[in-house]
Amino acid sequence: MSRRPNFGGMGGMNMQQMMKQAKKLQAQMAEEQENITAQTFTGKSADDLVVATFSGDRKLKDIKINEEAIDPEDPDMLQDLIIDAVNKGLSQIDEATQASLGKYTKGLM
């Protein structure tokens, strides 16, 4: 005679509640991600010589380069300004994502 574990009763109800809670949590996370995606993030280099604008899904939407940043004798400076502006814009997206979704993932990693 084999014994089966008892999964019915209160344990089964807890599993249903856990699944319902997980679906609710997943919907909340998706909504917050949509909110981030809908936002605009702007990274600026020193003196706003380069301004990079991103959507929340990390797509570059616009880049403005001030003519003062364009020195044919020093292309490296322009490259550095662009890198700085782009990285700052992406960092803003990361910070917003962490602030919004971090509460859901805290302690999971």
Image (cartoon, rainbow, N blue to C red):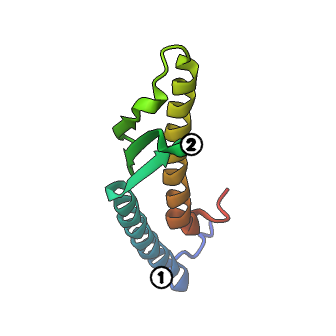
Give the x, y percent position of residue 4: 59, 69
Give the x, y percent position of residue 91: 55, 48
Q: Residue at x 56, y 37 (%)?
A: 84
Disc 1 marks a residue whose amino acid type is Met
Q: Is residue 50 left or right of residue 7?
A: left
The residue that label 2 is drawn on is 46
Give the x, y percent position of residue 83: 54, 32
| Nearest to the observer: residue 99 or residue 78 | 78
Compute the Cα span from label 2 to label 1.
58 Å
Q: Residue at x 43, y 42 (%)?
A: 51
Q: What secondary structure is found at the residue carrying circle 2?
A: helix
Q: Residue at x 43, y 50 (%)?
A: 42
Q: Are marks 2 and 1 in contact (CB under 8 Å)?
A: no
Q: Residue at x 55, y 57 (%)?
A: 95
Q: Residues within 10 Å of mark 2 (few under 14, many from 20)?
A: few
Q: Is residue 33 above or below residue 80?
A: below
Q: Is residue 3 left or right of residue 12?
A: right
Give the x, y percent position of residue 10: 53, 85
The residue that label 1 is drawn on is 13
Closer to the observer: label 2 or label 1?
2
Q: Is residue 76 above or below residue 47?
A: above
